[in-house]
Image: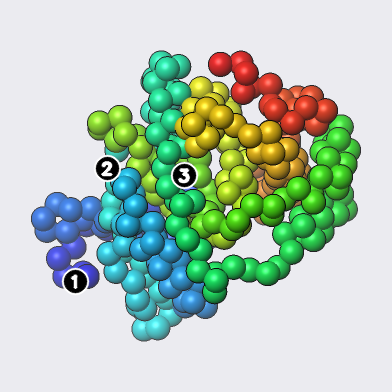
């Protein structure tokens, strides 16, 4: 892509990513997103660009691949993607009726089902044991010095049920699928952005971000996403596996947030406490919010 045709470059500050992000506009008033990463991440970012190409063949609005390469005298990699025009879904949900929120979740659930439909290349399947990694990180949480009252229920649930995970075929994951990474389009459809956490793994793992970030925004949206994915026939195994991921992430995210400061740690502690309540200290595998709408 010829940068001589760019007429404006504006830095984006939102998000957790370590890479630098910019909105660029060309002489034809077309907008793109530019992502700059360290050259040490070249292989990782090249693979990410390839995954985005796979997703771009599907039938939904998303940040499509435009260009990828090396810049700044070999110090950085760049990725240019199409810009998805619209409003952050996380913000738009606050202006919708509960039925409209549910319908937005329904559209998102159908998109997620499409993402998971792509056949995974054998070369992309990681043989690393997810179970051992999760148990190790639970141990790190317990040693971190930051504990949540009643967290033993989550710890024990993970340890007792972690064998449930990875029982399904591997899928390509978006990796961070929640309203904060979705766009509300002018026709009320949903667009998808931010694929930088893409991965290969259990399809049901994608849903724990509902508990982490979406329930506090819109319960109808969360219900809609789940109902759409399963055509309103949610299997019991889904709830058992999801509860493992929710319990694990509710603890691990507290330790993860330390590097971002006390406010973020406090936010993750609040979410952990909410999860314990929603799952009745993991005596139930179906969160209470699911039946509240």
Q: Nearer the viewer, residue 2 or 197?
A: 197
Q: How is the image coloured?
A: rainbow
Earlier sequence position, callout 3 versus callout 2: 2
Q: Nearer the viewer, mark 2 or mark 1?
A: 2
Q: Where is mark 1, residue-wise?
A: 2
Spot occupied by residue 98 in the image (x, y as percentages of width and height)? 45, 17
* Residue on which the image places disc 2: 85
Q: Of all residues shown, which one is farthest toward the bottom?
A: 73
> In this view of the protein, which residue sits in the foreground, 159 or 14?
159
Q: Nearer the viewer, mark 3 or mark 1?
A: 3
Residue 99: % across, % down: 42, 17
Residue labelled with disc 3: 113
Quick check: 205 above or below 226? below
Q: Provide the secondary structure element on which disc 1 rests.
A: loop
Query: Could you give the CA–CA distance between mark 3 and mark 1, rounded to whole angstroms?
Result: 35 Å
Q: Position of residue 249 (x, y in %)?
A: 70, 45
Q: Residues within 10 Å of mark 2 (few under 14, many from 20)?
A: some
**Secondary element at tag 3:** helix
* Distance of label 3 from label 2 (alpha carbons): 23 Å
Does residue 42 appear to the left or right of 150 in the view shown? left
Q: Residues within 10 Å of mark 3 (few under 14, many from 20)?
A: some
Find residue 132 and report its image quarter. Answer: bottom right
Residue 83 appears in the rendering: yes
- Relative to 192, is 222 on the left or the right? right
Secondary structure at numbered mark 2: loop
Q: Please state, as top left, top right, bottom left or bottom right, where the N terminus lies in the image.
A: bottom left
Please state which of residues 57 and 74 is positioned toward the viewer in this rendering.
57
Q: Residue at x 35, y 42 (%)?
A: 191
């Amino acid at each position: 892509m010829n940068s001589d045709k760019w007429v404006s470059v504006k830095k984006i500050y939102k998000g957790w990513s370590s890479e630098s992000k910019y909105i660029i506009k060309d002489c034809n008033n077309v907008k793109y997103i530019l992502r700059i990463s360290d050259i040490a991440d070249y292989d990782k970012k090249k693979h990410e660009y390839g995954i985005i190409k796979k997703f771009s063949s599907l039938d939904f609005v998303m940040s499509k691949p435009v260009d990828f390469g090396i810049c700044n005298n070999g110090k950085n990699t760049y990725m240019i993607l199409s810009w998805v025009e619209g409003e952050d879904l996380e913000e738009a949900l606050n202006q919708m009726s509960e039925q409209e929120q549910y319908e937005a979740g329904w559209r998102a659930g159908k998109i997620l089902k499409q993402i998971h439909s792509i056949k995974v290349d054998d070369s992309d399947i990681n043989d690393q044991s997810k179970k051992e990694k999760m148990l190790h990180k639970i141990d790190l949480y317990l040693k971190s010095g930051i504990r949540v009252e009643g967290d033993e229920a989550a710890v024990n649930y993970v340890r007792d049920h972690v064998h449930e995970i990875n029982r399904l075929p591997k899928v390509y994951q978006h990796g961070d699928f929640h309203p904060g990474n979705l766009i509300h389009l002018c026709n009320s459809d949903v667009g998808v952005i931010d694929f930088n956490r893409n991965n290969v793994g259990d399809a049901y793992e994608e849903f724990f971000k509902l508990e982490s970030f979406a329930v506090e925004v819109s319960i109808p949206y969360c219900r809609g996403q789940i109902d759409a994915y399963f055509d309103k026939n949610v299997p019991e195994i889904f709830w058992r596996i999801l509860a493992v991921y929710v319990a694990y992430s509710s603890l691990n995210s507290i330790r993860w947030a330390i590097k971002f400061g006390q406010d973020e740690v406090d936010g993750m502690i609040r979410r952990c406490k909410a999860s314990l309540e929603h799952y009745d200290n993991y005596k139930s595998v179906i969160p209470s919010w699911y039946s509240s709408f």
